[in-house]
């Protein structure tokens, strides 16, 4: 951990976004993670995405569980709201916060341990409820914070730092999420911001639960030879299937695309995601096809990345519940809490 | 683009903006750290090695290092490099016993003409090698313009005397009141080499009507000289100074100390086109000197032998969008009354004592043909330096010329080829002390530049010898040293170690670093995380990185040398290494010899 804070001084030519901020206004405090941790790189991609979307930091709420990954909300968007919950419980906190104030933008940050072991049930139900949030699963195949035990995402046969092989089959969060009905599922790599930043922007614009499974190497416990979540292994086996360009609601499409070559999905807020098919045979709106494609490549040892599945007509939690259209804090207290008599009246209906 | 060769000493030298900007390549960050540690004597000696007159230059240097300083590109005001130099000089112990003594006689005799800073530097460098050095000076005191033209309220005599003594007392044969009036005669005396350091001694005149009808029109540099030698100690109440360069600033401020009450400096052009340094202008304006712009002198008005004033054309200029001045348009004629006029419109070379049949050629400004690198004239064994070589510059350039001429003289006297210059080398030494500890202060201090305190206006005019600047106090010094960004602590990259985790790129507060596909320089400069628009500063470009074949590019322009890239790198691919430029001097050999015998 560095003894000095990152100096406030910066490049005078740094670009400003529509609300006059530079990307440095999206920073948090100095990271205390190991130098070179993939999670820090994901934090930078998150800052870049919110900066590019000109979102005011105080309109964002960050929630997380426990783990190195779950520590990172401290390191970005210092001006945002935040809640660091107990291990694996971030989805409940996010659900509750979102129920109370639907006007904030929610970003959950979790790890493969936090989401796929202790928090697997919570993870599944937040997807099932289609909570409107982006869910960053920073996936390094180990419990980094507790010194590198295999997690549930570690591949069978993958080697621990001291050589022991993992005996269990992995849980693939992408396949799990698609099968649970998740409406936005992407996989990326902390070492590829060109891919990651537009994916995060697309996820933010998506209405409903957006999962980003980001391979994020643990330099200290899982970056050796024999690991299948190292920088080198991921670079070698990564297979970009669809490249998603994010195009804001008022932006022109700058990249020249031949008709028929690019498919577009219009997001809830009018922005669009345009796919550049790297693999012609892939259709990111066909759920069954997506599952079999990912399964097939997984069997071959390839890590399929990109925006793998998206369904934009989704209903989020609030529309399913028919809840009030505004944040609870904006509802007058009298209306929000009509008092003991009103409660009695309601209860009397079931007498 | 081509990957960078960090072994080329120029690459890291250019990163040290101040040192690159200093004609004598003074190791500024090193001496600033020595001051920070309270080792003023070491800081003084570090300065003296390259600039020979730290006490003088800590007050009056033209300071090309300051506009070059990187700090000025980040928060507008550069580090007060010059002020810190003065701190080192003011607080240094006596260093007499730390200077190399005159070396055992080598039997060679050198003549230097003029005892200005250029000649004194030549003597300083050649003494330890055992040369027999004679300096001929026409005045009764050494120092050249440092004594005769720079007024003592900017440069006290004791400071100058002390630094000249440090050279002369080690065994120079200084002959005062000894003008050289014939080069031929001097050459006939059989010296092994002759160095000409006679300056640019002629002030330009302004031949307008009335110029010769009065004795109250003075040539600036001659007038300052008479003031310095106490031949003049009064002036009229109303004074006009023509010209707005540094000489004009010294003339107007000196006038105020000799009885001038209404002193105006007259400029032909608008502000922004003045020749004087900003700080000299500020100091003059603080003393209530009026600066009148867009006035073109027309005539001196003299009635019955008495100077009444001057007439001027008041001019109007248009300034184009690109900042160019149009041709002036005359709006009206103006008369300004005055008792004295001082002409400060420039200086020229003049060599009445060099016969024109010796094989030397001179251009239309009477500057001789002199080699820019070796300082050799067209007669073998004759060298020029300082203002006499290429026209008026400043002290630090004259000193650098002196160093180069000394190298040439030593080569000439040793029978070597003078154009075969000794190489400049560079050392790199890691500053790593612990995981995140460095042997320099790497945190960025956001302090603003400290302001120099001045003697009260009511006090300073009492005597021309009262030094106006008080120097930095302890608090000011302690803050100012921390403003230095330690640009000599270089980010050194080992591409074979990089795993492309992006940590360094992400942590860099000024967005210096980018991992990207290689491209031509112009394209590359625009595809970095922040545009690299300052082409004065180099890009560092690595070879292909092991995992993706991309390259690591560093824009050296704004790096604050915080070391965070090296702290966040998991593999130690970045290291913070102090670069030490090894500048060659004529007397290096003498130092080597002394080491062997010690
Ligand atoms: C008014 C004024 C203010 C200045 N202020 C600054 C300043 O603040 N900072 C700065 O860096 N520079 C300043 N300069 C410029 C600086 O003083 C000169 O660039 C520098 O002194 C040049 O040094 P030099 O050794 O080449 O020559 P000089 O300093 O000119 O020395 C030449 C010497 O040679 C002697 N000499 C000349 N002819 C003969 C001869 N035939 N025989 C014997 N001796 C002879 C002269 O008497 C003189 O002593 C200023 C100049 C002027 C005019
Ligand atoms: C209830 C509970 N059980 C166990 C732990 C111990 N623990 C802390 S972090 C962690 C795993 C974190 O792994 P992951 O979510 O992958 O985060 P990483 O550190 O790898 O980013 C565990 C098991 C805990 N803090 N709380
Ligand atoms: S232990 Fe691993 S996951 Fe945790 S900070 Fe270090 S590198 Fe990152
Ligand atoms: S030392 Fe490194 S992190 Fe600091 S400014 Fe320079 S390149 Fe950036
Ligand atoms: S921190 Fe080190 S390993 Fe990571 S990208 Fe930078 S130089 Fe490479
Ligand atoms: Mg983990």
Image: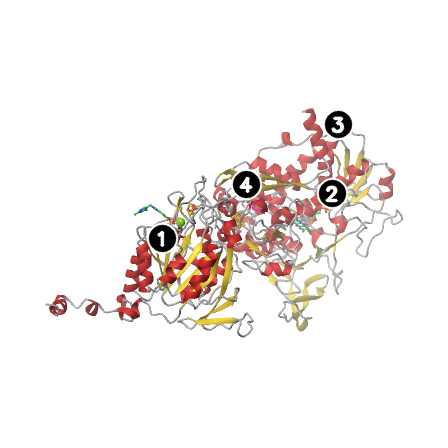
Q: Residue B487 lies in magenta, yes or no?
A: yes
User: Where does residue B152 sit, x and y in percent of width and height?
Assistant: 62, 46
- Alpha carbon separation for disc pair 1 and 4: 53 Å
Task: Quadrant for the N terminus of chain A, please.
Answer: top left
**Which is nearer the eye, B597 or A202?**
A202
Outermost residue on the bottom side: it is A259
Query: Which residue ends up furthest to the right in the rendered image?
Result: B357
> Is residue B385 shown above or below B133?
below
Residue denoted by label 2? B404
Quadrant of the drawing holding the C terminus of chain A: bottom left
State which region is magenta: B486-490
Whichever of callouts 4 and 2 sits on the residue coming sooner in the sequence is: 4
Quarter holding residue B134: top right
Q: Is B393 situated left or right of B578 in this image?
A: right
Q: Could you tell me which secondary element the residue under label 1 belongs to?
A: helix
Q: Residues within 10 Å of mark 4 (few under 14, many from 20)?
A: some
Q: Residue at x 61, y 33 (%)?
A: B95
Distance of label 3 from label 2 (alpha carbons): 22 Å
Q: Are marks 1 and 2 on the same chain?
A: no
Residue placed most toward the observer, B325 or B587: B587
Disc 3: which residue:
B104
Residue density around tag 2, few if under 14, some if 14–19, many if 20 or more, within 10 Å: many
The chain holding disc 1 is A
Q: Which residue is labeled 1 in the image? A: A116
């Amino acid at each position: 951990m560095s003894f000095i804070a990152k100096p406030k001084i910066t490049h005078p030519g740094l670009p400003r976004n529509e609300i006059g901020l530079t990307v440095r206004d999206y920073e948090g405090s100095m990271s205390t993670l190991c130098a070179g941790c993939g999670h820090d790189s994901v934090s930078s991609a998150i800052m870049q995405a919110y900066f590019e979307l000109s979102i005011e930091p105080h309109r964002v709420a960050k929630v997380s569980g426990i783990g190195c990954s779950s520590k990172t909300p401290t390191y970005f968007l210092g001006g945002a709201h935040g809640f660091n919950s107990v291990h694996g419980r971030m989805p409940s906190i996010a659900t509750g916060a979102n129920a109370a104030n639907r006007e904030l933008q929610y970003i959950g940050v979790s790890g493969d341990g936090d989401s796929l072991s202790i928090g697997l049930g919570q993870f599944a139900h937040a997807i099932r409820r289609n909570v409107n949030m982006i869910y960053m699963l920073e996936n390094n195949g180990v419990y980094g914070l507790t010194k590198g035990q295999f997690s549930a995402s570690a591949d069978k046969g993958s080697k621990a730092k001291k050589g022991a092989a993992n005996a269990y089959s992995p849980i693939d969060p992408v396949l799990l999420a698609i099968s649970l009905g998740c409406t936005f599922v992407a996989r990326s790599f902390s070492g590829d911001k060109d891919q990651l930043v537009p994916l995060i922007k697309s996820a933010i614009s998506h209405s409903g639960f957006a999962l980003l499974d980001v391979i994020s190497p643990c330099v200290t416990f899982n970056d050796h030879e024999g690991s299948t979540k190292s920088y080198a292994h991921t670079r070698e086996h990564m297979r970009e299937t669809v490249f998603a360009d994010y195009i804001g609601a008022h932006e022109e499409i700058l990249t020249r695309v031949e008709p028929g070559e690019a498919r577009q999905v219009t997001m809830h807020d009018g922005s669009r995601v345009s796919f550049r098919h790297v693999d012609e045979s892939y259709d990111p709106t066909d759920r069954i096809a997506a599952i079999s494609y990912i399964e097939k490549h997984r069997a071959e040892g390839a890590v399929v990345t990109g925006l793998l599945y998206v369904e934009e007509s989704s209903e989020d939690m609030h529309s399913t519940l028919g809840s009030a259209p505004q944040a609870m804090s904006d509802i007058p207290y009298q209306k929000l809490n009509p008092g003991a008599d009103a409660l009695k009246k309601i209860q009397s209906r079931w007498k | 683009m081509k990957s960078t060769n960090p072994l080329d000493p120029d690459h890291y030298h250019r990163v040290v903006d101040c040192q690159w900007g200093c004609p004598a390549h003074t190791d500024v960050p090193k001496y600033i750290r020595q001051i920070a540690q309270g080792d003023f004597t070491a800081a003084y000696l570090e300065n003296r090695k390259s600039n020979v007159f730290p006490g003088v230059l800590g007050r009056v240097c033209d300071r090309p290092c300051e506009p070059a300083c990187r700090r000025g590109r980040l928060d507008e005001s550069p580090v007060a490099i010059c002020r810190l130099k003065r701190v080192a000089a003011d607080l240094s112990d006596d260093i007499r016993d730390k200077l190399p003594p005159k070396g055992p006689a080598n039997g060679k005799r050198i003549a230097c003409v003029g005892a200005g800073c250029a000649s004194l530097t030549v003597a300083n460098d050649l003494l330890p090698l055992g040369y027999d050095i004679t300096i001929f000076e026409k005045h009764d005191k050494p120092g050249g313009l440092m004594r005769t033209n720079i007024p003592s309220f900017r440069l006290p005599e004791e400071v100058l005397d002390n630094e000249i003594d440090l050279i002369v007392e080690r065994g120079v044969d200084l002959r005062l009141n000894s003008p050289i009036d014939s080069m031929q005669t001097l050459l006939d005396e059989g010296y092994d080499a002759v160095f000409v350091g006679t300056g640019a001694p002629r002030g330009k005149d302004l031949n307008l009507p009335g110029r010769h009808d009065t004795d109250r029109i003075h040539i600036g540099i001659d007038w300052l000289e008479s003031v310095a030698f106490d031949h003049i100690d009064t002036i009229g109440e109303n004074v006009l100074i023509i010209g707005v360069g540094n000489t004009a600033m010294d003339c107007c401020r000196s006038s105020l100390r000799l009885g001038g009450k209404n002193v105006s400096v007259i400029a032909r052009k608008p502000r922004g086109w003045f020749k004087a340094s900003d700080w000299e202008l500020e100091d003059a304006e603080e003393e209530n000197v009026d600066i009148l712009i867009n006035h073109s002198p027309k005539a001196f008005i003299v009635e019955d032998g008495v100077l009444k004033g001057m007439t001027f054309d008041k001019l109007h200029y248009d300034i184009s969008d690109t900042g160019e001045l149009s041709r002036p348009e005359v709006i009206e004629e103006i008369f300004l009354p005055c008792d004295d006029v001082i002409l400060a419109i420039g200086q020229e070379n003049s060599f009445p004592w060099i016969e024109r049949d010796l094989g030397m050629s001179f251009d239309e400004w009477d500057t001789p043909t002199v080699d820019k690198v070796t300082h050799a004239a067209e007669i073998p064994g004759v060298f020029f330096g300082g203002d006499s070589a290429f026209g008026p510059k400043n002290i630090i350039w004259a000193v650098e010329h002196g160093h180069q001429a000394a190298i040439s003289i030593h080569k000439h006297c040793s029978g070597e080829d003078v154009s075969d210059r000794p190489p400049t080398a560079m050392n790199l030494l890691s500053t790593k002390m612990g995981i995140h500890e460095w042997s320099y202060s790497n945190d960025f201090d956001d302090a603003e530049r400290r302001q120099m305190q001045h003697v009260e206006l009511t006090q300073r005019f009492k005597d021309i010898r009262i030094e106006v600047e008080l120097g930095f106090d302890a608090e000011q010094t302690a803050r100012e040293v921390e403003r230095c960004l330690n640009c000599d602590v270089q980010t050194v990259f080992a591409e074979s170690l990089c795993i492309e985790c992006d940590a360094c790129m992400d942590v860099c507060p000024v967005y210096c670093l980018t991992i990207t596909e290689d491209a031509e320089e112009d394209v590359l400069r625009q595809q970095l995380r922040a545009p690299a628009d300052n082409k004065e500063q180099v890009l560092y470009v690595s070879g292909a990185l092991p995992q993706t074949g991309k390259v690591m590019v560093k824009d050296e322009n704004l790096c604050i040398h915080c070391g965070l890239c090296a702290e966040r790198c998991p593999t130690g691919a970045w290291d913070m290494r102090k670069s030490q430029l090894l500048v060659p001097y004529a007397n290096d050999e003498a130092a080597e010899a002394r080491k062997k015998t010690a």
